[in-house]
Every structure is written in structure tokens, then in C-alpha cells.
Amino acid sequence: MKVATSDPFARITAVPGRGHQPAMWLLGSSGYSAQVAGLLGLPFAFAHHFSPAKTIPALALYRSHFRPSDVLDRPYAMVAAAVGSAVSITIGTRPPPPRQCP
């Protein structure tokens, strides 16, 4: 996309910049996606916040189905989890406020 030189954003260069290809990860929340990532030899990110009980089994499936590829020679995974923090246990264990939709 061409941006006019008079555009105030014309001088901005995104980082990572031109020519950089970020790593492709397969994000999943099931055993099926874990197997696909393993068979393709891709890094796998598991959505623990969607399926907490399936995290360990999915990672085991990923490892057992992993085939080395041009991307990876061994399994590489991460777990995506929703977490919270607070200044004290009392505040941290309070129920969260209801969600407000904009």
C-alpha cells in the first residue's frame, strides 16, 4: 500500500520491518489442532483459557505427533492462559466485576 508523502504516518516504519517474516504458530484448543501442529512441524500454542482440562493431553499429542520440519527440529510449545493479579490475597480473591460492553 502506498502512502502519500504528505501523510503524517509516511515516515513510520513498522518493526519488525520490511522483509521480516514472523514465526508462524498454530494456536489451538483441542487435540486435533495439537496433532496438526505436530504433523506440520510447527510451534504450537495451546489456549488453556478455553479448555484447561485439555492442556496436558493436547501437549502430549503434539509431542507424540511431532515430525521435524524446515521450521523446527523438535517440539516447541507455549500455553496461553488468562491470569489476574492483585496487591493482596483479599483483593485477588474477590469476584470480578461484571463485564461492561462498550
Image: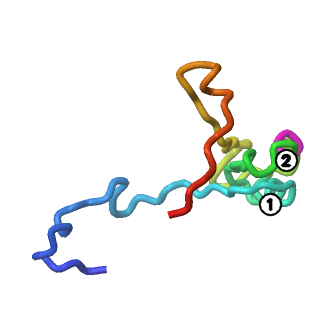
**25 falls in the magenta region:** no
**55 falls in the magenta region:** yes
Range drawn in magenta: 54-59
Q: Amino acid at mark 1?
A: Val
The N terminus appears in which quarter of the rendering? bottom left
Q: Residue at x 68, y 42 (%)?
A: 81
**Which residue appears farthest toward the left when viewing the image?**
6
Q: Is residue 75 left or right of residue 70?
A: right
Residue 57, given in percent of the width and then of the height, sits at: 89, 43
Report the Cα–Cα distance between label 2 and label 1: 11 Å
Q: Is residue 42 left or right of residue 99?
A: right
Where does label 2 land, which residue? Answer: 58
In the image, residue 19 above or below residue 23 = below
Crowding at mark 2 (Cα within 10 Å: few <14, some 14-19, many 20+): many
In the image, residue 29 above or below residue 2 = above
Residue 52, given in percent of the width and then of the height, sits at: 81, 43
Where does label 1 land, which residue? Answer: 36
Q: Nearer the viewer, residue 19 or 81?
A: 81
Q: Residue at x 60, y 25 (%)?
A: 91
The first of marks 2 and 1 along the sequence is: 1
Q: Main secondary structure of the magenta part?
A: helix
Q: Nearer the viewer, residue 85 or 99?
A: 99
Instruction: Please identify, in this view, whether the residue under mark 2 or under mark 1 is nearer the observer.
Output: 2
In the image, residue 36 above or below residue 65 = below
In which quarter of the view is residue 20 placed? bottom left
Q: Amino acid at mark 2?
A: Ala
Q: Residue at x 86, y 46 (%)?
A: 54
SS type, badge 2:
helix
SS type, badge 1:
helix
Q: Are marks 2 and 1 in contact (CB under 8 Å)?
A: no
